[in-house]
Amino acid sequence: MATKKFKTEVTDLLQLIIHSLYSNREIFLRELISNASDAIDKLKYMSLVDGSLKGFSFDPRIDISFTEDGKRTLTIKDNGIGMNEEDLNNNLGTIASSGTRKFLSSLTDEQKKDSNLIGQFGVGFYSAFMVADKIEVLSRKAGEEKAYRWVSDGKSSYEIEEAERDEQGTTIILHLTEDGYTYANRYEIESLVKKYSDHIAYPIYLEYDKVNYNYEKKDEKGEPEKTSEHVVEQINTCSALWRRAKNEIKEEEYKEFYKNNYYDSEDPLFYIHTKAEGTTEYITLFYIPQKAPFDMNYADYRPGVKLYVKRVYITDDDKTLLPTYLRFVRGIIDSEDLPLNVSREILQENRVMASIRNSSVKKLLSEFKRISENNPELYEKFIKEYNRPLKEGLYSDYANRDALLELVRYHSSSRDGYVSLKSYKENMPSDQKAIYYLSGGKEETLKASPLLEAYKKKGYEVLIMDDDIDEIVIGSVYEYDKIPLKAINKAAAMDDLKEEGDEKDKEEKKGLAEKIKAALGDKVKDVRISTRLVDTPAVVVNDDSDPSAQMQRILKQMGNADLGDIKPILEINASSPLIKKIEESSDDEYVKTLSSIVLSSAMLQEGILPSDPVAYTKAISELLSK
Ligand code: ADP
């Protein structure tokens, strides 16, 4: 017999589970049944694909039994894939999923008390320690001869020894704590299985002693005669919810199914159940969670969609079932046309799968759109959680870009909350020719940008794109509904604001621009007379082909060190008193000092620190002392 220590992460997880989920400890049964069902899924799958287990035949079942006398026990037994010694060490001695591990270490103490959050990642096997002070796992891996017994009190270590088991599968024996005694009870088990595990695709049997009363025959006390009979009864209905007709499923059933299968204590935001008939036959049931899954923004997120073929579970870990930007979607795809032994490699290239995937994306996007039109309140909740992944779709899913452009939302210079491109367009005055946006910064910074002045004056709305991802994505979106999109911090956008007389003014002030350019030397690419500034002396913008300051930062972070020296264009407001001072002065030093202050201030407005802060402060103090 070998005694082994749990990895510390397991001890931490055990503590966390016991503390935060205790009031909801009944979920342990759901977790164990779900593990049993997964293990049967795996064996069934292995028996269908090429390999040593191909053709393996067995009658899938899960058995639950309990003892009521003395130290009470509850036993959950399956005939699935089973575990050998190595599996037991790996699966029940560590935390297998790296996502779970990362999630756990990212939690603050406050969050650790939030059982919704903890419940979200599927606490699994260890939750049984909420009701048991000792757990025995007897397991034999399919195709192998040896069986093993794993025993632990869930404190700091476990033991493993060789054992006997008639057939493949796993038996979990819980030695219940006094608090856990309630679960050694027929009615309790039946009701928990109904509540959480009714849809499990394999029969769940409960073994118990049924007491029969014979009212014909009374004993000496006048009580009916009691006889007891040992029975094994199936207690789940095994019906795959998604296969039932839509009109026969109650809303409550949809919600329960979601909560019990996707580790969420809240109802879904909405769901979409589709049965496709025709060239490809399949059923999809998709759910949108109220809150974005905790690992949505991790690279190793856990996909939320399970694939079934003719009701046989194939995989829940394939990131290609839906595009990455829809990784928050939970649910099921059940196909009639895929081969049962479809492998992952085949899956990615399979035409049937590609067609299911394409139609599923279209269905989801059109449903999101329908909700945006019919139920703005619901849509707002949705967009608060999922705006960002949808924006990723703008560059990763070119084929659906138009649909996605209808779904994404942005802040606006003239309205609160979120604005759609459609409503932006409807708001455009007739002389406005482009959709203007400003990106690359926080909402407050962008909203304070002096570049907005002239647009406000003209009654043009400017979209405030303050999400990091906007900066990366929006440059690749050239138009919406035939209207070009233009960044107002690019030099070209200025041309759109031209008014009569501007050219003449510009011509007149050409000398001024040149004067400042000469004073600034190679610090700027150009100096131009602005037609779009009202109160501010100057702004910096980028040449149309140059990346914005924010984009330059992102590119550098991504390792593009050799961007070269990208210089801004300084746009000056010739009617501002400060610029007038430069115009009127013939003192070269003074012109230089003022010009460099104008440039540095304009950069500061954009959140760019002057390259030489010392020179900047020196220039200011020189000026003040004059
Ligand atoms: P999860 O199920 O979320 O992966 P668990 O802690 O419940 O986490 O289980 C850890 C691993 O132990 C499972 O991924 C599985 O490989 C294995 N396991 C648990 N229960 C069984 C079982 N009844 N039969 C076979 N393997 C099991």
Image (cartoon, rainbow, N blue to C red):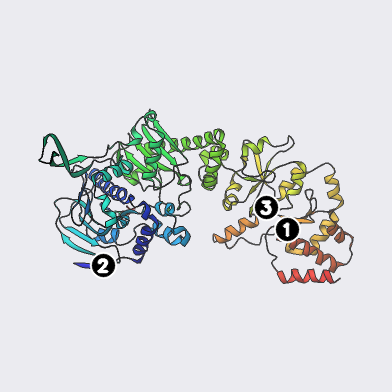
Q: Amino acid at mark 2?
A: Lys
Q: In the rendered structure, find residue 4 and report the number of the disc placed on it.
A: 2
The residue lying furthest to the front in this view is: 221
Q: Nearer the viewer, mark 3 or mark 1?
A: 3
- Report how far apart the C-alphas of labels 2 and 1 lie in the structure: 68 Å
The percent coordinates of residue 436 (x first, y second) are 68, 44
Compared with residue 180, is residue 220 higher up or lower down, i.e. above or below? above
Dividing the picture into quadrants, the one containing residue 251 is top left
| Gap between marks 2 and 3 measured at Cα | 57 Å
Residue under the point 85% across and 67% down:
590
- Give the amino acid at mark 1: Lys
Q: Earlier in the sequence, mark 2 or mark 1?
A: 2
Label whose residue precedes the other's in the sequence (3 or 1): 3
For disc 1, the marked residue is 525
In the drawing, what numbered circle is on residue 446? Answer: 3
Look at the picture and state if 155 lies above or below 64. Answer: below
Residue 228 spot, x, y in % from top left = 13, 42
Q: Residue at x 26, y 58 (%)?
A: 87
